[in-house]
Image (spheres, rainbow, N blue to C red):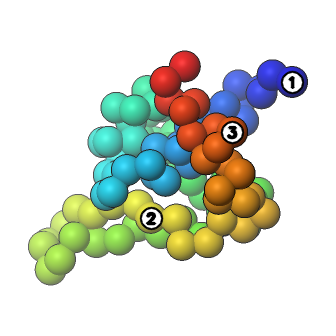
Amino acid sequence: MALSADTQRKYAIIAAIATNNTPTLANIYQLTGIPVSSLKRQIAQLRMDYGMDIRFVPDGNQKGRTGHYHIYEWGVLDRTEFLVRYGSILER
């Protein structure tokens, strides 16, 4: 079964966060091609739709909003199964 375009975008964002050590919005954009403004909305949607706990983690004590994203809780998704099935979605 093919994934809808919206689901493909969401899964690409999840894969970009899950498979990188410290993915910033710029890193996620480079990997997915999804504009930063859309990324922020999509991450909020993932939190609501899938019950995921995706947090922005600030880098040290630097001023401004520098940091990266981390998945603390996968919600309704099983991390291992997701990565087996969709971990390579960014390579498509």
Q: Which amino acid lies under the numbered mark 3 shown in the image of this protein?
A: Arg
Point out which mark residue 75 bears: none
Measure the alpha-carbon separation of dots 2 and 3: 20 Å
Residue 83: image location, x then y, percent: 61, 47
Residue 33: image location, x then y, percent: 43, 27
- Above or below, 17 against 48 in this view is above
Report the residue marked by disc 3: 85
Give the mark nearer the N terminus: 3 vs 1.
Answer: 1
Q: Is residue 38 left or right of residue 30?
A: right
Residue 43: image location, x then y, percent: 56, 53
Give the mark nearer the N terminus: 1 vs 2.
Answer: 1
Residue appearing at x 31%, y 58% in the figure = 22
Between 38 and 14, the residue placed more toward the observer is: 14
From the viewer's perspective, is the residue at label 2 or at label 3 nearer?
Answer: 3
Quarter holding residue 72: bottom right
From the viewer's perspective, is the residue at label 1 or at label 2 nearer?
Answer: 1
- Above or below, 13 against 48 in this view is above
Tag 1–tag 2 contact (CB < 8 Å):
no
Q: Is residue 11 visible?
A: no
Q: Which amino acid lies under the numbered mark 2 shown in the image of this protein?
A: His
Q: Extreme left residue here?
A: 62
Please tell me how many numbered marks the rendered image carries. Answer: 3
Give the mark nearer the N terminus: 2 vs 3.
Answer: 2
Report the residue marked by disc 2: 70
Report the residue marked by disc 1: 1
Considering the numbered disc 2 on the image, is that residue within a helix, a strand or a loop?
A: strand
- Above or below, 39 against 88 in this view is below
Quarter holding residue 44: bottom right
Q: Which amino acid lies under the numbered mark 1 shown in the image of this protein?
A: Met
